[in-house]
Image (tube, rainbow, N blue to C red):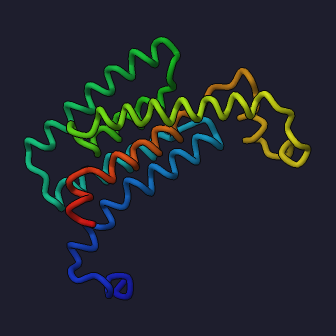
């Protein structure tokens, strides 16, 4: 543990850096996991929420900033529930969008949703092209590739959410201030 902290000036700055890095690392995990399993686990969403709480306490964020982030997340969740009710989006996608909106804050939610739409459209087109071609024999041995190739399967939108969330995150004030 001491070796891990040796390169840091202060323990608090290391803890803050770790908290701030938890978001992109967990988003990458969510995106890759969604492609492989077509699921975003609840415990991953809870870890993202806990990481936000830790980062908000360490930075510290003002109560107004936290309230605005929570409001933005609530709006995203409400809109996500509508999409879920029409079966346009899975429940894990809605939860991931919501916790990402919490991390990104009210000022970055609109660009995040725009990026998600663009990345989602590109992802959907790539998957439709992938499903239109016959799989090479070497790929047929992988269950997750077969699942992704099924024409009646959904689109693992978590990858688009993750990519958009990381892009939007790079523009947040707390990341710009730290890095």
**Direction right: furthest residue:** 137
| Image: 87 above or below 112 | above
Please state if 7 lies on the left or on the right of 10 as rendered: right
Q: Position of residue 6 (x, y in %)?
A: 32, 87
Q: Residue sitting at 61 percent across and 35 percent down?
A: 38
Q: Position of residue 150 (x, y in %)?
A: 76, 28
Indicate the quadrant containing the N terminus: top left, top right, bottom left or bottom right.
bottom left
Q: Is residue 106 visible?
A: yes
Q: Residue sitting at 52 percent across and 16 percent down?
A: 87
Please state if 84 lies on the left or on the right of 51 as rendered: right
Please state if 64 lies on the left or on the right of 111 as rendered: left
Q: Quadrant of residue 72?
A: top left
Please state if 32 lies on the left or on the right of 178 as rendered: right
Indicate the quadrant containing the C terminus: top left, top right, bottom left or bottom right.
bottom left
| Image: 172 above or below 100 | below
Q: Is residue 43 visible?
A: no
| Image: 99 above or below 1 | above
Q: Position of residue 116 (x, y in %)?
A: 44, 34
Foreground of the two, 120 or 68: 120
Q: Position of residue 113 (x, y in %)?
A: 37, 32
Give the mark count: 0
Q: Residue sitting at 38 percent across and 82 percent down?
A: 4
Q: Residue sitting at 71 percent across and 35 percent down?
A: 148
């Amino acid at each position: 543990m001491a070796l891990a902290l040796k390169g840091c000036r202060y323990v608090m700055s290391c803890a803050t850096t770790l908290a701030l890095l938890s978001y992109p690392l967990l988003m990458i995990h969510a995106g890759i996991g969604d492609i492989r399993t077509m699921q975003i686990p609840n415990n991953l969403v809870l870890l993202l929420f806990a990481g936000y709480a830790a980062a908000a306490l360490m930075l510290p964020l003002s109560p107004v900033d936290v309230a605005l982030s929570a409001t933005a997340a609530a709006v995203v969740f409400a809109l996500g529930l509508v999409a879920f009710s029409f079966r346009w989006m899975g429940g894990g996608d809605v939860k991931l969008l919501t916790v990402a909106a919490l991390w990104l804050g009210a000022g970055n939610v609109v660009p995040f949703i725009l990026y998600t739409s663009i990345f989602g459209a590109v992802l959907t087109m790539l998957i439709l092209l992938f499903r239109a071609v016959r799989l090479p024999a070497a790929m047929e041995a992988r269950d997750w590739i077969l699942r992704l190739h099924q024409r009646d399967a959904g689109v693992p939108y978590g990858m688009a959410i993750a990519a958009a969330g990381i892009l939007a995150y790079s523009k947040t004030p707390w990341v710009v201030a730290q890095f």
